[in-house]
Amino acid sequence: MDTREKHKVKDKLYSYNPAGYCGVFVSRKVMKKLAGMTTKFEQEVREVLKANIDDLYCYEWNLAYPNKIQTAVYFATKGDLNHRIDLFRARQPEVHSEVYLAAAFGEDAKAIIKQIEEEGRLKDKVNDK
């Protein structure tokens, strides 16, 4: 059995990353539980925002380049807040069918990456013919 197959997780996993920085992989069983919570969370957030609409501003930004350094500049406006509130969605999880149980920078991971790269080169050669 090659390194890639030896370390491949058998089930599909979902990347759950609600904050954008601290994601985890979860099983289908856990994802089903989180999905219900996420829907409830979205509804509650929209209710709180609509109940406090006078205290909200639209979040906008643009780029400026003082001294040739890219800098974000933020703006608060009283645009169409109801529309923005209606569009609010929590970050949705992605399903992953190929996940490997190995440290990302360890020797096994390097072997898996090398195998994937070699397979890609082989596919490219076949496609070139």
Image (cartoon, grey):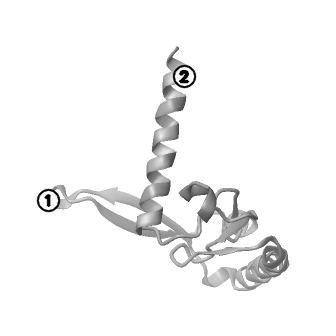
Query: Alpha-carbon distance for marks 2 and 1?
Result: 50 Å
Q: Nearer the viewer, mark 2 or mark 1?
A: 2
Residue 55, position as x, y percentages in the image: 61, 84
Most extreme residue toward the top is 129
Q: Nearer the viewer, residue 79 or 4?
A: 4
**Residue depicted at x 54% and y 58%:** 3
- Under circle 1, the secondary element is helix
Total labels drawn:
2
- Under circle 2, the secondary element is helix
Residue 127, position as x, y percentages in the image: 55, 21
Residue 84, position as x, y percentages in the image: 67, 65
Task: Identify the image quadrant of the N terminus.
Answer: bottom right
Please name the amino acid that badge 1 sits on. Answer: Asn
Sequence-earlier tag: 2 or 1: 1
Say which residue label 1 marks.
67
- Specify the quadrant of the image occupied by residue 41: bottom right
**Residue depicted at x 20% and y 59%:** 69
Residue 129, position as x, y percentages in the image: 52, 14
Category of crowding for the residue at label 2, using alpha-carbon neighbours closer than 10 angstroms: few (below 14), some (14–19), many (at least 20): few
- Can residue 63 be seen here? yes
- Can residue 99 be seen here? no
Say which residue label 2 marks.
126
**Residue depicted at x 70% and y 56%:** 97
Q: Nearer the viewer, residue 74 or 120?
A: 120
Side (left or right) of 96 relative to 62: right
